[in-house]
Image: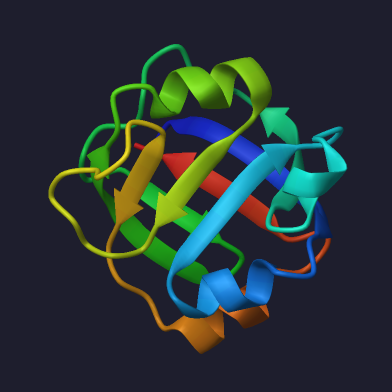
Amino acid sequence: MTVLLETRITAIGPEVADLAEGGVVILFADGSPPELAEVSVLHTVLQGPSEDAPPVGASIAIGPIRADVTAVGATAWAKVREIGHVVISFNGAAEAERPGEICAGEVDGTALVAALETGAAITIAA
């Protein structure tokens, strides 16, 4: 497997748990505006992001939670590369509803909330 992006969680906004319960995680690189930080998982990049977007079937891991990518929005990876921002929807959708979204297989919302902790790794690999 090739690592396309590896990051480390540095902070978790106060509204993140509510979104994650519903299977949505919003990533923003450290230094995001305060109003966005409230709903975001802030992170610092350790490796990547790769030139090319992850293909369908690539894996996303947040701590012990793992899912396969099912769709990538048209501008999602460009936003990751430019500002470290992406919306990950663990909804199993075959097509992204929003251009800045990466969809992945469904996961347990409670387990996802538990996995979102400062210091945890987020890895996308193909």
Tell me residue 83's x, y (percent): 66, 22
Could you tell whether 108 is left or right of 20 in the image? left
Q: Residue 113 falls in which quadrant of the image?
A: bottom right
Is residue 66 in view?
Answer: yes
Tell me residue 25's x, y (percent): 54, 58
Tell me residue 121's x, y (percent): 68, 54
At 60% from the left edge and 23% from the top edge, which residue is drawn?
A: 48
Q: Quadrant of the N terminus?
A: top left
Furthest toward the left, the residue is 94
Name the colouring of the figure: rainbow
65, 34: nearer the viewer = 34
Tell me residue 66's x, y (percent): 42, 65
Is residue 49 in view?
Answer: no
72, 51: nearer the viewer = 72
Could you tell whether 17 is left or right of 104 in the image? right
Furthest toward the bottom, the residue is 110
